[in-house]
Amino acid sequence: MNKNFQATLAAAALLTLGGCAQNAAPVDTAPDVATIHAATNAWVEAYNAGDADKIAALYADDAIMMPPDAPAAADHAAMKAYLLADMAASKAAGVSFALDTDASGVSGDLAWHSGTFHVAGANGASVATGKYAEVWHKADGKWLMIRDVWNNDAPAAAAAAPPAAKK
């Protein structure tokens, strides 16, 4: 092989390998994590206040909300319909939501946030507990939820007994 060709090939290989090096400074994700945590807290505050519009604004147009014991809601209208009914039931029962623990991570324009919650009765005592997981996407400088699922820790209700046979 020609010496110039070998030198060019070696230089190209070194440049290629140099581009693969992971010597970049770590990205500070703390501001993004804080933004996502604040948005989740805003979700809970809006729920307890009965503000479905404020909650729906936290979701991307193509988001999917997956609440417990209900069909998935795949657009803002379906989300708001679910939320309005659920918030009314919570208000009638005198209960509210509160977050307990959480963890999160950010990688580029995607993030996840998960944790636990409890439902407090009118006297402040916990009447139910559960967990949640959210997936967030950052577009045009704004974080919006693209997937949201939560469920309760309580076991499923027992099946109803069959009716007694008639004689």
Image (cartoon, rainbow, N blue to C red):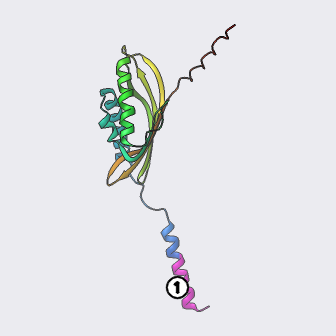
The single residue placed furthest to the bottom in the displayed view is 2
Q: Is residue 106 above or below residue 52?
A: below
Determine which quarter of the picture holds residue 125: top left
Q: Tell me which segment is drawn in magenta.
A: 1-13
The single residue placed furthest to the top in the displayed view is 167
Label 1 Cα neighbours within 10 Å, binned few <14 / some 14-19 / many ≥20 = few
Seen at 37% across and 32% down, the residue is 83
For the residue pair 142 and 160, the one nearer the viewer reads as 160
Point 38% across, 22% down: residue: 89
* Residue 27 in which image quadrant: bottom left
Where residue 50 sits in the image (x, y, percent)?
31, 28
Which is more toward the observer, 122 or 53? Answer: 53
Q: Is 10 included in the stretch rendered in magenta?
A: yes
How many numbered discs sit on the rendered protein?
1
What is the quadrant of residue 75 in the picture? top left
Residue 7 is inside the magenta segment: yes
**Residue 17, horizontal then vertical, whole percent:** 53, 71
Q: Nearer the viewer, residue 127 or 159?
A: 159
For badge 1, the amino acid type reads Thr
Where residue 112 sits in the image (x, y, percent)?
45, 44
Q: Quadrant of the C terminus?
A: top right
Report whether 39 appears left or right of 163. left
Magenta-colored segment: predominant secondary structure:
helix
Q: Relative to 26, is 49 on the left or the right?
A: left
Nearest the eye: 17 or 159: 159
The residue tagged 1 is 8
Disc 1 element: helix
Q: Is residue 143 above or below residue 151?
A: below
Quadrant (top left, top right, bottom left, bottom right) of the N terminus: bottom right
Left or right, 122 with respect to 1, comes to: left
Q: Residue at x 37, y 51 (%)?
A: 138
